[in-house]
Image (cartoon, rainbow, N blue to C red):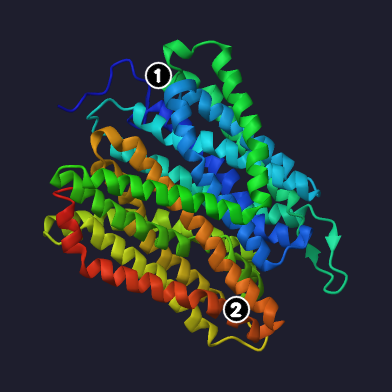
Amino acid sequence: MASSVPTQESTTLGHPTGLFVLFFAELWERFCYYGMRALLVFHLIAVFGKSNAEAAVIYGAYTALVYALGIFGGYIADRVLGYRHSILLGGLIMAIGCFTLLSHDETWYLVGLATIIVGNGLFKPNISTLVGKLYPQGDPRRDSGFTIFYMGINLGAFLAPIFCARISRWMSDIVDPVTKEIVPDYRYGFMLAGIGMVLGLVVFGVGKKHLQGKGERPPERQGAGSLLAVTAGCALSIPLIYALLLKKDEVGTALGILGVGFALYLFVFALRSERVVQQRIFALLILLLCNVMFWASFEQAGNSLNIFAANHIHHLSIQAFNWTMLPEDFQAVNAIGIVLLGPVFAAMWVKLDKGGANPSIPAKFGLGLIQVGLGFGLLMLGMQSADAGGRIPWFWLVGLYLIHTSGELCISPVGLSMVTKLAPEKMTGMVMGAWFVSIACANYCAGLFSKIAGEVVIADDAVGASALQGYVTAFTPILYMSVALGVGLFVASRAVNKLMHGVK
């Protein structure tokens, strides 16, 4: 039976007021994360002299560890600190990490990245859970509440690259001696990202009364002891994460062991289970593998595609407004695409469902993979029109991002829901951990894909149009693997769907 809206509940626009507290807190947290993410590889190359290939692997290791630590953040919130205190502590640690990035010393810079990773592990998985806790079981407003919250995520992701990139130029006093152009000082972008995180914490702290007492610590964990213990654990984790960032290959090894371990555990569990559970886990393993391929391709965005935008794109200029598109601005295309296309896809799935033509979850995964591959195909088609300087019009890269956004909308909205439905009741936490590990592995693989482009360019000492060969070398296998896996899954989607035994 659907629950009614509690009479004592404070509401705004028909939803718990706490939803909008979490909306703005998450908006600023995503502003922080996506702002520094858009600048990361550029800063590594410009300040620390990293090659494109080296920067790609650091970026991949960083984003992989961000997702990997989310597994532990959820456990800490459930068992020790509660969701509200986990979010506050995680946000504070992230803000400290962003301000640490202002250092020109490489050691301290990597310490800052490690600090952000630890803080994000506490913050990111728990604020979404807290949104769900604002609604009673069966509340019909829950789905639209998550839609509003998702808009906050994408609004922050849209604004961050634009403003962090521009403040890095507006406040810079560095001038290129040859071109006489202002050279971005990305420390100011990191500073703005940190300020965004602080604003998110202020909103979250001030809005405590609107959270209806949800997400507080377990009764047995009251007092300062638990908070001090978790804080100490986070402080001790930072040097460990720093060491992994220094030895980037070991991140891949650790993630590989973790991923294979999860897969073997689920496989053995399936063999010992009754038929329905067994087949659902087999379907889950197939989709987890496809999830790795999708995000390994998609997450070229802040890495190789970011560098491509800087070196090989004629940027859009609107003289009437004295506005020119910056390389970092392309990072905002996906977010605005989600906002514009999300409602279209939602309505399309409903209409198809009424006509009995709504694709199954495996078919949607297949369509997503095909689209992420075709996005790279479109960009490589655009490369054929490159001028002597190796630059192509901006709309080819925007086209790639819009195709990728369409692919994301086929996979991302159904992914987490699919995991919870396919998981055996007593293993939901374990299976959710496998989902996050698959995304972590994908992000590390994304760094390896990007490394290929950088290594080819360096090996050939290529400039101008010839430098595009490095990207063709890197993107061609992504195109073929994504499309082949997507087509294979789409063709086999009915068989995979049967393994799911009614899960939709």
Q: Position of residue 254 (x, y in %)?
A: 53, 49
Q: Amino acid at mark 1?
A: Gln
Q: Position of residue 452 (x, y in %)?
A: 58, 72
The residue lying at 21 percent from left, 49 percent from top is: 280
Q: Position of residue 331 (x, y in %)?
A: 55, 59
The numbered mark, 1 or 2, whose residue comes first in the sequence reads 1
Residue 493 picture quarter = bottom left
The residue lying at 84 percent from left, 68 percent from top is: 176
Q: Is residue 355 left or right of residue 292?
A: left
Cα gap from disc 1 to disc 2, whole angstroms: 54 Å
Q: Amino acid at mark 2?
A: Gly
Q: Taking the image as drawn, is residue 280 in sight?
A: yes
Contact flag, marks 1 and 2 (Cβ < 8 Å) = no
Mark 1 or mark 2, whichever is nearer to me = 2
Please give the residue where the numbered disc 2 appears in the rendered image.
470
Q: Secondary structure at mark 2?
A: helix
Please give the residue where the numbered disc 1 appears in the rendered image.
212
